[in-house]
Image (tube, rainbow, N blue to C red):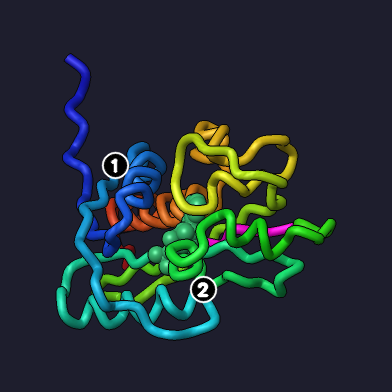
C-alpha cells in the first residue's frame, strides 16, 4: 500500500469570491495546503496599494481570529489610465464592468495592462506578503467564457486570447498563481526547516 499522505494543513482565506478560493486551492494542493473560505465583509481599508490593503487587513483579522489566515487583494492596472482601476477594480467592475474599461480605452492604441495580486499570510510570527504580477493587454472586445471579473478583456503577454478563453494558461501564469506559488514554496521550506533533525551538540 502506498504511504498515507498526511492531512493537508488548513488555512483560512478571507474572501467572498469563490473563484479566488478555487484558483488558490488548485495551486496549493501539491503543497498539501487547503484554504477554507471565510466570508470577509467590511475588512477592507482604503489605500492605493494592494500590498498595504492585504497586509493591514490580515493583521486586523489575525488580531480577532488568532488562527493562520490569508487576505488576498488584487486588481487590474491599465497603463493608459495611469493604473486605473487598480485598487478600485472590484468597485469599478460592479459599476461599469468590462465594457466600461473598453469604453475608456475606445480611442487608445496603448493597451498595456497588468494584474497584480498581493497575498498576506498572518500567523503568530506576524504577517508576510507575497506578490504576483502578470503583464498583458486589454482586448478590443469582451470574450465571454471562463473565469471572472476582467478575465474576458485581459490578454496575457504572448497570447492572442484573453484569460476567459484560456483557463489552463490562467491557472499557470496568472498574478494569483504566481503569488500563491511563492507562498506554497515558503510554507514547504518552513516545514522542511521545522522537521529537520537537530544536530547534537558536541563538547
Ligand atoms: P478584490 O481583490 O476583492 O479587491 O477584487 C479585485 C477585483 O479585481 C475583482 O473583483 C475583479 O474584478 C478583479 N480581479 C482580480 N483578480 C482577477 C482575476 O484573476 N481575473 C479577473 N479579474 C480579477
Question: Does the stretch in magenta take in 101?
Answer: no
* For marks 2 and 1 on the same chain, the one whose residue lies earlier in the sequence: 1
Of circles 2 and 1, the one toward us is: 2
Q: Whole-percent x and y of residue 56?
A: 37, 82
Is residue 125 in sight in this rendering? Answer: yes
Q: Residue at x 24, y 72 (%)?
A: 41
Q: How many marks?
A: 2
Helix, strand or loop for disc 2: helix
Is residue 175 shown above or below 72? Answer: above
- Name the residue tied to disc 1: 32
Q: Image quadrant of residue 94? A: bottom left
Q: Residue at x 26, y 65 (%)?
A: 69
- Name the residue tied to disc 2: 87
Q: Indicate left or right for 200 with 168 as reference.
A: left
Q: What is the chief secondary structure element of the magenta stretch?
A: strand
Q: Residue at x 16, y 80 (%)?
A: 64
Check the image and name the residue furthest to the right. Answer: 109
Q: Indicate left or right for 111 with 172 as reference.
A: right
Q: Does any atom of ligand 1 lie closer than 8 Å to the CB of label 2? A: yes
- Quadrant of the image containing the N terminus: top left
Is residue 146 shown above or below 134? Answer: above
Segment colored magenta: 112-117
Helix, strand or loop for disc 1: loop
Q: State the residue in front, 41 or 177.
A: 41
Amino acid at each position: 500500500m502506498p504511504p498515507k499522505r498526511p492531512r493537508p494543513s488548513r488555512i483560512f482565506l478571507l474572501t467572498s469570491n469563490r473563484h479566488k478560493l478555487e484558483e488558490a486551492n488548485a495551486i496549493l494542493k501539491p503543497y498539501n495546503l487547503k484554504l477554507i473560505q471565510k466570508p470577509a465583509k467590511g475588512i477592507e481599508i482604503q489605500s492605493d496599494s494592494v500590498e498595504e490593503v492585504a497586509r493591514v487587513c490580515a493583521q486586523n483579522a489575525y488580531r480577532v481570529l488568532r488562527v493562520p489566515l490569508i487576505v488576498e487583494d488584487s486588481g487590474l492596472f491599465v497603463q493608459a489610465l495611469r493604473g486605473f482601476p487598480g485598487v478600485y477594480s472590484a468597485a469599478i467592475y460592479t459599476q461599469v464592468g468590462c465594457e466600461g474599461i473598453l469604453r475608456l480605452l475606445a480611442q487608445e492604441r496603448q493597451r498595456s495592462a497588468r494584474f497584480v495580486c498581493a497575498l498576506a499570510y498572518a500567523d503568530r510570527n506576524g504577517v508576510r506578503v507575497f506578490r504576483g504580477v502578470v503583464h498583458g493587454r486589454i482586448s478590443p472586445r469582451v470574450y465571454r467564457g471562463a473565469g471572472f471579473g476582467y478575465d474576458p478583456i485581459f490578454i496575457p503577454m504572448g497570447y492572442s486570447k484573453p484569460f476567459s478563453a484560456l483557463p489552463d494558461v490562467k491557472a499557470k501564469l496568472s498574478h494569483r498563481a504566481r503569488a500563491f506559488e511563492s507562498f506554497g514554496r515558503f510554507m514547504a521550506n518552513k516545514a522542511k526547516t521545522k522537521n529537520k533533525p537537530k544536530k547534537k551538540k558536541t563538547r
